[in-house]
Image: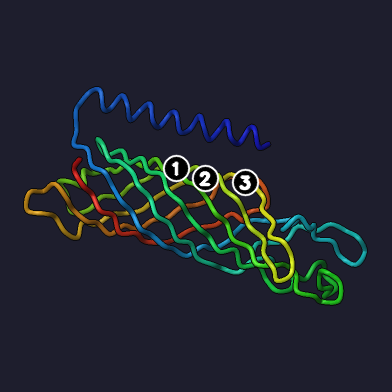
Amino acid sequence: MLRRFCSFGLAATLLLLSVASADAITRVGKKYNVLEFGAGYASPYGHYDNFGGEYFIDQYDRFHQLNADQVFKSSYSIGVFFGQLRNRWMVSVGGVYTKVNQLDTIVVGNFGYVWPYAGAVVFSNFGQWDLRLDVNYQFMDISENQFTPYAGIGLAAGLISETAPGIDANYDANTLLSANFGVEFKLWTSADKRKFVTLASVNSYDLLSSGYRPRNLNIGGAIKVYMRP
């Protein structure tokens, strides 16, 4: 499953990059280096049969799949990216931290049973650390217009950390494929038009993931600084 996911993500990225290269060959456009600072709201979705390496089992030793809202609370993410815009294609690489908020107790089954035994605190503190690649297409030329919608894909590889007082930290590697979408608005342009600043809605929907990281609908914003090299 992980090999198939990685192959799919690599193929999708190569396809987008090849289209961008073909577009660049047909016409030479402006090139901008871009620095991005962003943060957002992460809302988990989907179904889960385990988290933190522990499977959800009721008092009769039966396995259960739980909805995301039975396992997680909403959380937040922050990130910093550096990228390049050319012919409306934005390719950026950066680091993202996402807090993973699990519920203190999880009810498994229809008997009001609290897992694990004795109603103990279910999990330690978890956080997701990612190195992320985003490939997005802007539908309008942001250097010439006041706004543009965009869409694309994101690929991430990272570690989910587990920490708790009195125990050694534990890390689990994972990967992610997401669909990106949003709108970008220009806030300021320099007199020589070689630099400008935008405010962007930075949203993504996690499509596929490996490991036990939660999949999220991410809604956020970012400040982007564009600079001609």
User: Do callouts 1 and 2 mark residues in contact (Cβ within 8 Å)?
Assistant: yes
Image position, residue 129 (x, y; %) = 55, 54
User: Do callouts 3 and 1 mark residues in contact (Cβ within 8 Å)?
Assistant: no
* Quadrant including the C terminus: top left
**Rendering quarter of residue 223:** bottom left
**Residue projecting furthest to the left:** 191
Image position, residue 75 (x, y; %) = 54, 67
Which numbered marker is on residue 133?
1
**Rendering quarter of residue 56:** bottom right
Q: Secondary structure at mark 2?
A: strand
Residues 159 and 2: in front is 159
Looking at the image, tell me whether mark 1 or mark 2 is earlier in sequence order: 1
Which numbered marker is on residue 156?
2
> How many discs mark residues in the rendered view?
3
Looking at the image, tell me whether mark 3 or mark 1 is earlier in sequence order: 1
As shown in the figure, which amino acid type bears the numbered disc 2? Answer: Ala
Question: How many other residues sit within 10 Å of disc 2, few (<14), some (14-19) or many (≥20)?
Answer: many
As shown in the figure, which amino acid type bears the numbered disc 1? Answer: Leu
**Residue at horizontal 65 percent and vertical 62 percent from the top:** 68
**Residue projecting furthest to the right:** 60
**Rendering quarter of residue 133:** top left
State the CA–CA distance, disc 1 to disc 2: 6 Å
**Residue at horizontal 15 percent and vertical 46 percent from the top:** 144
Looking at the image, tell me whether mark 2 or mark 3 is earlier in sequence order: 2
Which numbered marker is on residue 191?
none
Which numbered marker is on residue 174?
3
Residues 33 and 218: in front is 33
* Quadrant including the N terminus: top right
Question: How many other residues sit within 10 Å of disc 3, few (<14), some (14-19) or many (≥20)?
Answer: some
As shown in the figure, which amino acid type bears the numbered disc 3? Answer: Asn
Left-right relation of 103 to 150: right
Q: Secondary structure at mark 1?
A: strand
